Amino acid sequence: MWGNVAPFSSKKVVAGMVDIPQQYKSKEEYVHHIFSSIAHRYDLLNTALSFNRDKYWRRFAVEKSGLQAGGTGLDVCCGTGMLALEQARVVGPAGKVVGLDFCENMLAVARQNIARTPYRNNIELVQGNAVDLPFADNTFDCATIGFALRNVPDIAQTIREMARVVKPGGKVVSLELSKPSWPVFKQLYYLYFDYILPVLGRIGVGLDGPYSYLPRSLKSFPHQSEIRDLFARLGLQDACYFELTGGIVSVHVGTVPTP
């Protein structure tokens, strides 16, 4: 079902192409280095740099996942576990959530975050790769990915894998930065994103580079309408997206078809 994708006009839709420094062999290696270096400050900076809107965005994404009490959810590229925790709040003590990430430093922070909550027995953390999920077909009621689709080595393969492991009728959901369309707001947003955010990020983590990658990764990432079309081309039904906070983030939703 998930094997074929029609040709795209831009390779960026499939691969999420972005220039990487020469010392790294691949985008995957570069992204791993970035997130390993900022894991200890990731949550604090996310909240500060999003003006505390990140909590609402995650809540909205999980609402659109269709996850219910007692259900089973997967969060791909779970990072520090914030979206997995939001799923756990919904499924409750009778449910289960699995968070997967390829970066051990991020998973270490996730373990600390989860251990401080009532959901520590409901969440399992797994180290693995988004383009080759270590789960059987039709395992989960939903699969989410938050602020990571633009970082994976192959966007289409990641979505395909998420769809594979979700049960028929379940949802695949992506929460991601997007490209606002309001004229004045758009200019102000890119001013903040291109010039102010990298400086604030450098102050926060004490390193050059990680938060300069952010604006570059967004510019190379397809428009939200293209991601919706990719969901549909991969066989997900009722593919749609919701723009939040003036379109600076979008939530994409698709339903795994029933036989």
Image: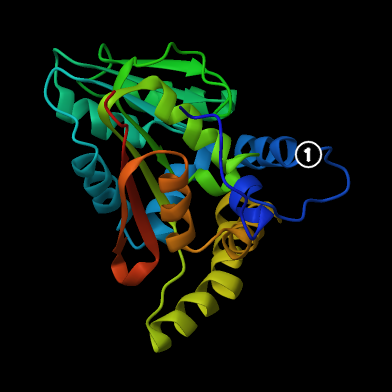
Query: Toward which corner of the image does residue 39 lie, by quadrant?
Result: top right
Figure check: 245 above or below 23: below
Figure check: 124 above or below 223: above
Percent position of residue 34, x then y: 66, 42
Camera-side residue: 202 or 227?
Answer: 227
Which residue is found at the position 19% from the left and 42% from the top?
Answer: 63
Percent position of residue 239, x then y: 33, 49
Query: Toward which corner of the image does residue 5 lie, by quadrant?
Result: top right
Horizontal arrangement in the rendering, residue 79 relative to residue 4 (left or right): left
Camera-side residue: 253 or 51?
Answer: 253
Q: Which quarter shows the C terminus? A: top left
Q: Amino acid at mark 1?
A: Ser
Percent position of residue 197, x then y: 54, 66
The way the protein has been coloured in the rendering is rainbow
Which residue is found at the position 55% from the left and 60% from the top?
Answer: 222
Which residue is found at the position 14% from the left and 17% from the top?
Answer: 70
Figure check: 107 above or below 82: above
Q: Which quarter shows the N terminus? A: top left
Neighbor class of circle 1 (other Cα within 10 Å; few <14, some 14-19, many 20+) is some
> Label 1: which residue?
26
Percent position of residue 24, x then y: 83, 40
Camera-side residue: 180 or 30?
Answer: 180
Query: Toward which corner of the image does residue 127 lie, by quadrant?
Result: top right
